[in-house]
Image (tube, coloured by chain):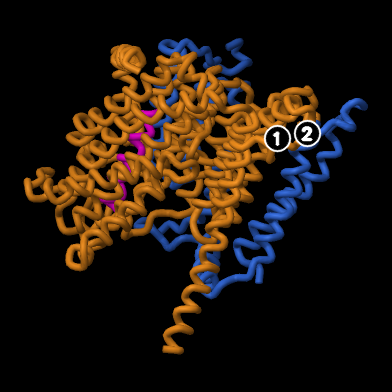
Amino acid sequence: MLDGILVGLSTAASPLNILMVAVGCFAGTFIGMLPGLGPISAIALMIPITYGFDPATGLILMAGVYYGAIFGGSTSSILINAPGVAGTVATAFDGYPLAKQGHAGKALAIAAYSSFSGGTIAAIFLLIAAPSLAVVSLAFQSTDYFALMVLGLTAVAAFAGRGKVLKALLMTVLGLMLSTVGTDQTLGMQRFTFGMLDLIDGISFLLLAMATFALSEALMSVLKPKTAADIQREKEANANLGSMKLSSAEVKDIAPVVGRSSILGFLVGVLPGAGATIASFLAYGMEQRLAGPDKGKEFGKGSIRGLAAPETANNAACSGSFVPLLTLGIPGSGTTAIMLGALISYGIQPGPRLFVENPEVFWSVIISMYLGNVILLVLNLPLIPYIARVLALPHTVLVPLILFFSLIGVYFVSFNTFDIQLMVIFAIAAVVLRLLDMPMAPMLLGFILGGMMEENLRRALIINNDSWSFLWERPLTLSILVIAALVLVAPMISPLIGRSLAGRREDAGEGG
Amino acid sequence: MLTRDRLGALLMLVFSLGYGVMIFDIPLLPFQANQAFTARTMPQALSVLGIVLSLALLLRPVSAAETNEEAAWRQAMRQLLRPTPADEEGRRTHPLVRVALLCALMVVYGLTVRPFGFLLSTTVFLAGGMFVLGERRLWLLLGVSIAVTLFFWVLMTQFLGVYIAPLPQVLGR
């Protein structure tokens, strides 16, 4: 492990890679701050640039963008109550009230320190967990991989939130369907190409990600124009941020919160399907309960604990979500899914072999997370008052620029103008689906995992002489599939159980 | 009642059915007919899954809480179809028309980027996009679009080594 850390350190500490972490954090903060644009869009916009670099540098840049985007999302949550990222919605609960009370600077500083601590603590966990899991996962076979992918996809749907499980599942299936377009990988048959040469290679994941995230998010922002109140809030946000200093009592108050939320965030991040958003809400809820009746009442009105908890947890979860990506090659969230897509297009197959075959990629990403956190703290925090001006940039200029960067990012990879037309079609479809409140991240995850899932299933069948019995005969595969079924069924039956328990309690109450 | 969930489910049902029908167009070689896994297997499973899930979402009963949410959503959708209140300069805008125009602009950009060259088509696209979104200051329209186009072209061709034809095809590039 020490050798690996040294390899990672020497790769990550090269001047180019340090520059990339800094550029990534900065660009991520900038994009993440724009309301409506999340880390998936931020990373997608960066991918065409990363094609010019070696895989380790590219992934380091994307990891920096990921952190930056989450931090940028926190800034817009705190300053204008408009989270750019779902993972920072909980940040706005107490961050915005603090900013309204004139403590915007302090709130931003707490967000930065908490993010730094959460990210750093989680990176240490990652350093320990990832290699151990990578060693274990070397024993995995295609059947287990197929089962793991089923688990990843069902978990994303299961964690989608109440009433959204079915919709998330449907979107996952849509993503899987889109992944079947093109030439079938083993038999060479054309599927759903309508006889078009441009579709023979299938739909590029970058095209789909850009169209359904960056493009459609930009178009959605046009559909929801800013109100006078929004513009006023943005003006006020830039007027005065106040002091960024924290008192020692405040530091003491949030220190245990940061510790607990880091662990919780990391663990939630490791779970497939659960990402920064769930981690931040869980940490917020946990701290509210732990704070006791007096301090708990302050939550939602500008509590510094209520701000530190989700901020720590969302960054810790970002690090945690790299564990399944780096060790199993299975993304736990939409954001890591897009990184997986990028890795595959570099010709690198993430999974247990990554640890053996490309140790420099594996370790340098982990090491660059420390660097990323330091840069966020040292570079971004002092620059926040200046970066925050991006919020005041006219929408009329920003939206065409985002559209341009999205289109040209895809065009410069393929030099095929058909891709631009296809992007417009996907973007319009994505806008319609977004208006119908259909979640897009499961679709992207399904699309990226679709090809691998089919390949693993087919390989498993070949190994087992065309028999499906491996699904129940191999204990590891069966266990993973059972977990997947449980994960899927749990949110559907838990309200029923809750209702029946409540009914019983009522009966008992009436009886007594 | 046709709620937004049901509308989404209906769309997905139609898509899954269409997808299912198109599976028959996937060619199969004679020896593959009896194999456990062919190029059609995964699409068939997905099509069935898509139909079952869409039907489940379509037929799911709507709870009272969802009815309230639904009303708010309908209100928001109706708002989309109407022009926004007049801004400081007395202009009323239509967000849906703007999105449609931006999409049309993107399609035109895709059609013109080769024949008209990168510099001209990109400048027109950016300036057009800003114009559609209500920007009327000429110096900003032209200044930003020309500066961004030139900066990007220099960055790509000079620093990242990607060749992009800058001029229209008629000028021999």
A491 magenta-colored: no
A414 vs A34: above or below: above
SS assignment for the magenta stretch, majority: helix
Kindly identify the residue that appears in the image at 27 percent across and 39 percent down: A118
Chain A tint as drawn:
orange
Report whether residue B82 is seen. Answer: no
Tell me which corner region of the image, top left, top right, bottom left or bottom right, holds residue A207: top right
Instruction: Determine which of the numbered discs, if any, sits on residue A4 in the image.
Output: none
Q: Position of residue A50 (x, y in %)?
A: 45, 21
Question: Among the chains, which one is blue?
Answer: B
Horizontal side of A359 relative to A190 (left or right) equals left
Q: Residue furthest left?
A: A248
Q: CA distance from mark 2 to mark 1?
A: 7 Å
Dot 1 surroundings within 10 Å: few (below 14), some, or many (20 or more)? some
Dot 2 surroundings within 10 Å: few (below 14), some, or many (20 or more)? few
Tag 2–tag 1 contact (CB < 8 Å): yes
Give, as a single range, the part of the protein colored magenta: A63-80
Q: Which residue is mark 1?
A: A470
A77 vs A355: above or below: below
Quadrant including the C terminus of chain A? bottom left
Report whether residue B10 is seen. Answer: yes
Q: Which residue is mark 2?
A: A467
Of all chains, the one bearing label 2 is A
Q: Residue type at mark 1?
A: Phe
Q: Position of residue A138 (x, y in %)?
A: 53, 23
Q: How many marks?
A: 2
B86 vs A314: above or below: below
Q: Position of residue A102 (x, y in %)?
A: 15, 55
Of all chains, the one bearing label 1 is A
A69 magenta-colored: yes
Q: Considering the numbered disc 2 on the image, is that residue within a helix, a strand or a loop?
A: loop
